[in-house]
Image (cartoon, rainbow, N blue to C red):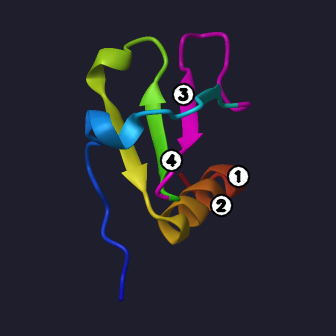
């Protein structure tokens, strides 16, 4: 079974999330926050405009995303 992405997280999905600012965020307002949700999914959101909501990813999708950021292919 392949994990399906959830484009936008619902409010209930984000309840109790502990957000932290990405170490890749710079001082030019390009900040992203990350949280691991109680479901095990990973969520990201824009720090400067949290009203835009959050996007969630399954574990494998998250691992692929982080690898792409680290190796510069994204």
State which region is magenta.
23-39
Q: Residue at x 41, y 34 (%)?
A: 15
Which numbered disc, 3 or 2, marks the residue that appears first in the sequence?
3
The main secondary structure of the magenta stretch is loop
Q: Nearer the viewer, residue 40 or 42?
A: 40
Relative to 37, say whether 14 is above or below. Answer: above
Left or right placement of residue 37 versus residue 9 in this view: right
Query: Disc 3 or disc 2, which is closer to the eye?
Result: 3
Q: Residues within 10 Å of mark 2 (few under 14, many from 20)?
A: few
Which numbered disc, 1 or 3, marks the residue that appears first in the sequence?
3
Describe the element under mark 1 as helix, strand or loop.
Answer: helix
Q: Give the labeled residue for mark 4.
A: 37
Q: Position of residue 27 (x, y in %)?
A: 67, 10
Q: CA distance from mark 4 to mark 3?
A: 16 Å
Query: Disc 4 or disc 3, which is closer to the eye?
Result: 4
Describe the element under mark 2 as helix, strand or loop.
Answer: helix
Describe the element under mark 4 as helix, strand or loop.
Answer: loop
Whether the residues at callouts 1 and 2 have beta carbons within 8 Å, the answer is yes
């Amino acid at each position: 079974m392949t994990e399906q992405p959830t484009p936008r997280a619902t409010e209930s999905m984000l309840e109790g999330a502990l957000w932290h600012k990405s170490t890749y965020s710079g001082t030019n307002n390009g900040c992203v926050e990350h949280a691991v949700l109680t479901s095990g999914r990973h969520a990201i959101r824009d720090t400067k405009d949290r009203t835009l909501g959050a996007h969630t990813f399954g574990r494998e999708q998250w691992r692929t995303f982080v690898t792409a950021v680290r190796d510069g292919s994204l």
